[in-house]
Amino acid sequence: MATAAVLGLTLAACGGSGDGGDGSSASGGADQVEVFTWWAAGSEKAGLDALVGVFNEQHPDIEFVNGAVAGGAGSAAKDLLQTRLQAQDPPDTFQAHAGAELQDYIDAAQIEDVSNLYDEFGLTDVFPADLVDRLSTDDGKIYSIPSNIHRANVVWANPTVLEDNGVDPEATYDDLDAWMADLEKLDKAGVTALSVGTTWTQVNLLETVLLADLGAEAYSGLWDGSTDWNGPEVKAALEDFETLMSYTNDDRDGLDWPEATQMVIDGTAAFNVMGDWAVAAFEEQDKVLGTDFTAAPVPGTDGVFDFLADSFTLPVGAPHPDGAKAWLETVGSLDGQVAFNKAKGSIPARTDADPADFSEYQQTAIESFSNDTIVSSLAHGAAAPVATLNAISDATSKFTTGASDLAGYQSELAAAAQG
């Protein structure tokens, strides 16, 4: 287990401290920390603010510098971050989705191995073993500390809209076919059956369709090469995705997830597929689970938890590495995870948090994460590297805007997965 002194010397050796031309000393930079995220509004900002509150209590001598950049799913932030990293001007720590999304930063030697911090902070004792396995590279190194766990395969519904249009709000669906029958009924009634937003939200929908139709094992096989992207099972799933998109709102490409979710809250749409950060949007507007809205696994994915995690890194050359280490300590701490996740709608990565501290929905998510089959999210960086996700997103945008047909779409997805 590394001591703080050894850690500081190690980071100094990799350029994390020393005189950077601004007169700073080689003290390890514990006076401030610039935290780079895309949590600039709504429940995401509320979660960050709650985490900062704990950080200020735990490390009152370190100044928090908010480097948040607005932009849906972090696209604007990631572009700016890459520019800074390439210019060797990294923030002290940055938000990234745990999993395959980190591989590009690892390959470019832009982030540090933080495995020793897991020992120092006692995280290996409180994070689930399968989560630690998902965070670890093939050589056993870990490059981030997760602040939470989110579930991507959730369908949200407005029960009043359903009942008013002849759909049982308490209906459960074993598969997509059963669900699409009710979507068709809503569509014929002139209702927006399924709200969706810009491309990344469509990719989120796509991954849940693939998961529903292929099952957990074959879905995971899409990312390790054991499932054929050109196969008939994938074609059938893409046909279902095409059908679902036909029930969505025409203005989708001009909306981000909050606006698409708001359609369900306002009663202008019946259903929405979105990760469980959406629960905070309902609760912020005093909507009650089971009365004003419902939440369930996407039809066909019951018993499967489509996993992603927001996490924080230690960049190579961070100007204030000791400040970054302090932030990472708060991120992994029990108090930090409880405060952050209560505000954001996600659940703690730690197993020692008390479920009673969280909302009714979050309690169900905690139970599901403990018991369900876990798979990795595509749209949120856990399943595939950034380049693969970008290529899949481009292909999806072409398909949903009518610039390619289904055969072309499947071919482009297969090419994207092969890199």
Image (cartoon, rainbow, N blue to C red):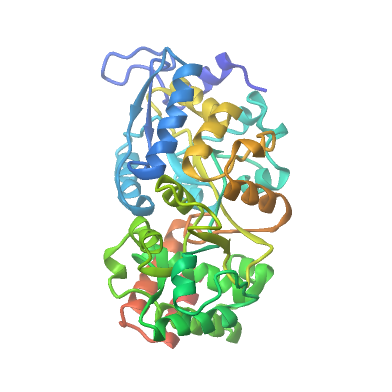
Q: Would you identify the image quadrant in which residue 83 lies?
A: top left
Q: Is residue 325 above or below residue 72?
A: above
Left or right of residue 47, residue 22 in this image: left
Q: Is residue 122 above or below residue 259?
A: above
The number of callouts visible is 0
Image quadrant for the N terminus? top right
Which residue corresponds to the image point at 56% horizontal and 75% vertical from the top-left?
Answer: 168
Which residue corresponds to the image point at 63% horizontal and 45% vertical from the top-left?
Answer: 136
Taking the image as drawn, is residue 392 in sight?
no
On the image, the x and y values in percent for residue 94 come to 42, 37
Q: Outermost residue, front direction?
A: 164
Identify which residue, 110 or 248, lies in the foreground. Answer: 248
Q: Is residue 288 above or below residue 319?
A: below
Left or right of residue 50, residue 376 in this image: right
Which residue corresponds to the image point at 54% horizontal and 68% vertical from the top-left?
Answer: 208
On the image, the x and y values in percent for residue 320 come to 40, 22
Which residue corresponds to the image point at 59% horizontal and 72% vertical from the top-left?
Answer: 299
Q: Would you identify the image quadrant in which residue 3 lies?
A: top right
On the image, the x and y values in percent for residue 365 come to 62, 51
Q: Would you identify the image quadrant in which residue 31 lies?
A: top left
On the image, the x and y values in percent for residue 246 come to 39, 82
Taking the image as drawn, is residue 386 in sight?
yes
